[in-house]
Amino acid sequence: MSGAIRHLVLVLGDQLWAGNPALAGFDPAQDRVLMIEAPGEATAVWSHPARIALFLSAMRHFRAELQSRGWPLTYIGLDDPAHADRPGLPERLQAMLAELQPQAVQACEAGEWRLQQGIEAAARAAGVPLHWHEDTHFLCSRARFARWAQGRKEWRMEFFYREMRREHGVLMEGKEPAGGQWNFDADNRKSFPKAGPGWIPEPARFEPDAITREVLALVQRQFPDHPGSLSEFGWPVTPEQARQALHRFIDERLIAFGAYQDAMWTDTPFGWHSLLSVALNLHLIDPREVIAAAETAWREKNLPLAAVEGFIRQILGWREFIRGVYWMDMPGLREANHYGHARPLPAWYWTGNTRMACMRDTIGQTLKHGYAHHIQRLMVTGQFALLAELSPQQVADWYLAVYVDAIEWVELPNVAGMALFANGGRFTSKPYVASGQYIDRMSNYCKGCAYAPAQRSGEGACPVTTLYWNFLDRHETELAASPRTALMVKNLQKLDDATRASIRTHAAYLLDRLDSI
């Protein structure tokens, strides 16, 4: 009967927490929860099987929690035959609105502009009122960020972060920052010792339970040609597991996270990193709990302030900031292309089959685990994409596809804005580029590589190094005008004409043969 359901509460796959504001005031006598698995969400980009499995397993565990409460719930499975001709989530939603005929739909803000538009279109087509609820998982609402950004010529995370610290009383001593300074980043840029990283405590890993095993089999069956492996799947899929992962990090790994957060080493996929972005981005754990645990560890366990501050800055600063940027700049951010780059993504981004050791290791671990840390994403795969003049849209799709923690609100600004400078410096003061010598300094990748990081051109020259100098050469005027990049240009201008010409020639050779590097 029409109107028999008062509120149909739509719960998306990255909103899996009991505090979901769309569930506030839920009345089992007259409301119903709707959760939708949609194959179109797995194929919008060529998603890593572990990314697909993570979302589905976490969703099914949340379904079990709601069912244990006795709440009415409609759950549309990935391979539900009744919806076989509707691969997209909005299509499936529209069909369910027609069938259930609720008086209204309640939903927490979506994490992706495309999906939010699709949900709104489905509700309009069905003639059902849709009520969005502010996502209270975040410490800074979209509206709060817009107020902060209003009137500012430049958006800089550092100033936003300081405001968040004051507003939420995090790492503060009265009105002053703990330790007398806001940012200890200068202490957090060490490479591993020459002998290697040594023993690093393992991050929490969770053996798949019956629900997860069922999901893994389903994903393997439905998406057999998608790039990446399910063999190492051990991500948290429940709030309890997320909390265990947090405590393992705080107790065993936070102590050295700060010093080595930028370091890279062959066959060391996780380093000292927390890996908590997975649980945070699915809302399995509250960022306030994560921040409080880190601050308590500093105050009560005497952990290094530089490590604690660096970790908190990633969550209270960068994570909140980047979400604000996304919603301020969409949908234009998706098409941003400051340099007009249009080269197709090399096929080896999907296989790791390249002679460049840094790319081979980073992509290899990405395909194995669905994970790489921020410097591997920014200064290895991301920097190469910028220097190789790859299409920002193809690169962004790749990042969204291959990382288990990728949701567009966090992925796209980091890729288009940070790694590729495609938005022309909307919130960054320079393109993040360096020669292969930076990678050599921060890792062991270059030892035994087919290419020499210090060599600019000619046979055996590191492609990163050649393309770095070519990038400076191509954009010399623009880079010379910025104090953040002027020194790079001065170094370029020290090269004689013959050297610069050889760089251009070798760069053109590489750019014509990206698939075979």
Image: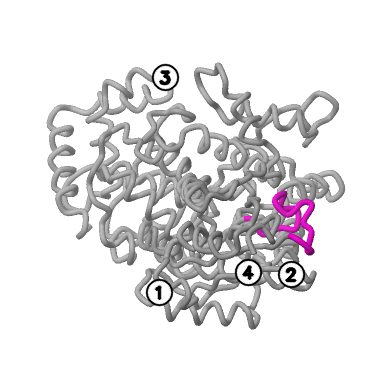
Q: Residue 223 got which mark?
A: 1
Instruction: Between label 2 and label 1, give the one nearer the viewer.
Output: 2
**Magenta stretch: helix, strand or loop mostly:** loop
Instruction: Between label 1 and label 4, give the one nearer the viewer.
Output: 4
Q: Nearer the viewer, residue 1 or 235?
A: 1
Q: Quadrant of the C terminus?
A: bottom left
The magenta span reads: 15-30
Instruction: Between label 4 and label 3, give the one nearer the viewer.
Output: 4
Q: Amino acid at mark 4?
A: Thr
Q: Residue at x 67, y 40 (%)?
A: 316
Q: Which residue is mark 4?
A: 74
Q: Secondary structure at mark 1?
A: loop
Q: Position of residue 215 (x, y in %)?
A: 55, 77
Q: Eyeballing the image, is 120 above or below 364? A: above
Q: Nearer the viewer, residue 238 or 253?
A: 238
Q: Return the disc, 2 or 1, that comes first in the chain's sequence.
A: 2
